[in-house]
Amino acid sequence: MAGGGVDPTEPVDIRYDNARARLEVDWADGVTTAYRYEFLRWKCPCAECAGEMGHPGRLQFVQSLAPDQYRLTSIEGVGLYAVRPTWGDGHDTGLYSLRRLRAMGTEAADDEAAALGLDGPRGRP
Ligand SMILES: [Zn+2]
């Protein structure tokens, strides 16, 4: 266990690998988590995708994403707490908090394992 006040949700390094279409984060406690772009896009937390105040978001009405929707064109840090990806369709309103990314690490690993050996989009995680 990490002691001495290390915040495990503090990222040490954030890399994106367009060849493998995955985002990788090294955390202060030595853990590395990885997220397929398609997985990340399904998890877009913005109001348009995920809904808000009891209203469903538009991702709840689709079964698959177009390739442009999960092609990462850039990603920027937002303060010290979040990252904001820009996707191939121009969508850039999703702020992914680092705390949430860390919490999604296990689910992302399961998703990647399930996607191994499959070609193309897998659909909703
Ligand atoms: Zn969104």
Image (cartoon, rainbow, N blue to C red):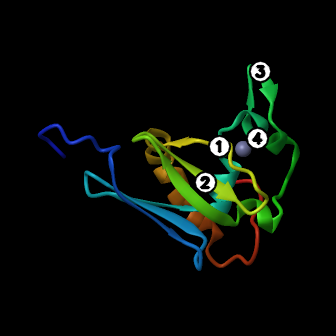
Determine the CA span between mark 4 and mark 3.
13 Å
Quadrant of the rendered image holding ligand 1: top right
Left or right: 57 in relation to 115? right
Which residue is under mark 4?
Answer: 49
Kindly identify which numbered label has been placed on residue 94.
Answer: 1
Determine the CA span between mark 1 and mark 2.
7 Å
The location of residue 114, given as percent across then percent down, is 62, 66
Q: Nearer the viewer, mark 3 or mark 1?
A: 1
The amino acid at mark 3 is Gly
The location of residue 119, given as percent across then percent down, is 73, 78
Number of marks drawn: 4
Assign a secondary structure to mark 1. Answer: loop
Q: Is mark 1 within 8 Å of ligand 1?
A: yes
* Residue occupying image coordinates x 57% and y 65%: 112
Q: Earlier in the sequence, mark 2 or mark 3?
A: 3
Q: Image height check: is 27 above or below 54?
A: below
* Marks 1 and 2 close (CB-CB < 8 Å): yes
Determine the CA span between mark 4 and mark 1.
8 Å
Front residue (pair 4, 89): 89
The amino acid at mark 1 is Gly
* Marks 4 and 1 close (CB-CB < 8 Å): yes
Q: Nearer the viewer, mark 4 or mark 2?
A: 2
Disc 2 crowd rating (10 Å Cα; few below 14, some 14-19, many 20+) is many
Determine the CA span between mark 3 and mark 1.
18 Å
Which residue is under mark 2?
Answer: 85
The amino acid at mark 4 is Cys
Q: Nearer the viewer, mark 2 or mark 3?
A: 2
Q: Earlier in the sequence, mark 1 or mark 2?
A: 2
Q: Is mark 2 within 8 Å of ligand 1?
A: no
* Residue occupying image coordinates x 65% and y 43%: 94
